[in-house]
Amino acid sequence: MIELNNVTKKYKNFNALKNINLKLDDYGIYCLLGRNGAGKTTLLKSIAGYQNITNGEILIDNKKISTSSMETGVSYIQNFAKHFNLSVESLIKTAYNLQPDFDYEFALEMIERFNLDKSKKFKKLSLGMKTMISTIICLSSTKKVILLDEPVLGFDAIMRSEFYELLLESFERHPRIIIVSTHIIDEISKTVQKLIIIDNGMIKFYDSIDIIDEKAYSVTGLKSEVDKITQSLNVIGETLAGNFSTKYILDERILHSQNVTIQSISLQDFFINIVGKKGGTF
C-alpha cells in the first residue's frame, strides 16, 4: 500500500533521506525509530505529501504522492501541531466537517475517557492535552494511512499508557497502516507489529517486532569464549570490559553453553546496537 522507490531528499548540501526503498503492504501498527536527525520526520512528511522529495517516488495505493496531490489518503500529525484557538468541541466538529468519513463518535468517546474539557480553548490546554487532542483527531480519521510523529511528547507515564490503548482501539475499529515515530522505545514494543529503524537517512532495519524476541540476544563471557561461540553468527554490536565481552546477536538462538551467559535483549538495546555501534548493516 505504501511504496518508496529510491527516495532521496536533499536540503542544500545535506541528504536527509538516502536512496530509500521500502514497501509496507499489510495493515498494522508500525514503529519508526531513529535518533535525533536520523530522518524520521523528513520521511513522514514526504509520505504525507507535505514536502516534495528530490529523487525517486512515493506511491500510496499506486498513486504518486507529492505536494500537488489532491488527496493522499494520509492523515499526519506532527509533534507540537498547532490548531485554531477553538474549544476542544469545536475542533472536533471542524475535523468532522472537513472529513466526511471522520469517526466523530470515536473522537467524542476518547474526549470523555481522557477527561478533556470540551469547552476549553486549545491555547489554554497543557502540552500533553494539546498533543492528546491532535492525536485523537488524527486517529479518528478513517484514512488508510495514519502518521504520528512523536505523539507521546509531553505525556506522563499514565497518559502514555492511555495513548497505547487508544492506538490499539483505533486500529481495531479501523484497520489500516499506522506509523508511530517515538523516542520511548521499550514501552511501545507491546503495541506494534512491525519495526522500522532509520539512521543517517537510510533504513537500517525493517521486520516484524517478533523477530527481536526470537532472534535478538546477547552472549557474555571471556572474550576468547564469546568470539569462538559467535564467529559464525550475525553480530550487531559488542561491548568490551577488560577480558570480558558482550556481543549482541541477531541470528538463530544458541540453546545453551557452559562458558558464556546468554540473555534476551530489550528493544532499546537492539536499537542502540543497530544504529550506535559497528555491525548494524541492515
Image: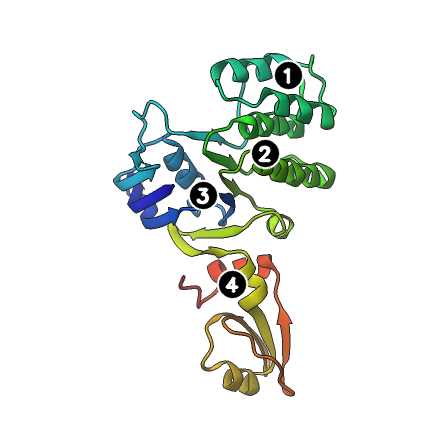
The residue beneath circle 4 is 273
The residue beneath circle 3 is 40
Q: Earlier in the sequence, mark 1 or mark 2?
A: 1
Whole-Å distance between the Cαs marked 3 and 2? 27 Å
- Measuring 51% from the left and 51% from the top, which residue is drawn there? 194
Q: Which mark is residue 105?
A: none
Q: Secondary structure at mark 2?
A: helix
Above or below: residue 244 compared with residue 267:
below
Q: Nearer the viewer, residue 232 or 2?
A: 2
Q: Is residue 209 visible?
A: yes
Whole-Å distance between the Cαs marked 1 and 4? 42 Å
Graded by Cα atoms within 10 Å as few (under 14), some (14 to 19) or many (20 or more), the crowding at tag 3 reads many
Whole-Å distance between the Cαs marked 2 and 4? 36 Å
Picture quarter with the C terminus? bottom left
Total marks shown come to 4
Q: Secondary structure at mark 1?
A: helix
The residue beneath circle 1 is 88
- Measuring 41% from the left and 29% from the top, which residue is drawn there? 73
Above or below: residue 48 compared with residue 202:
above
Q: Earlier in the sequence, mark 4 or mark 3?
A: 3
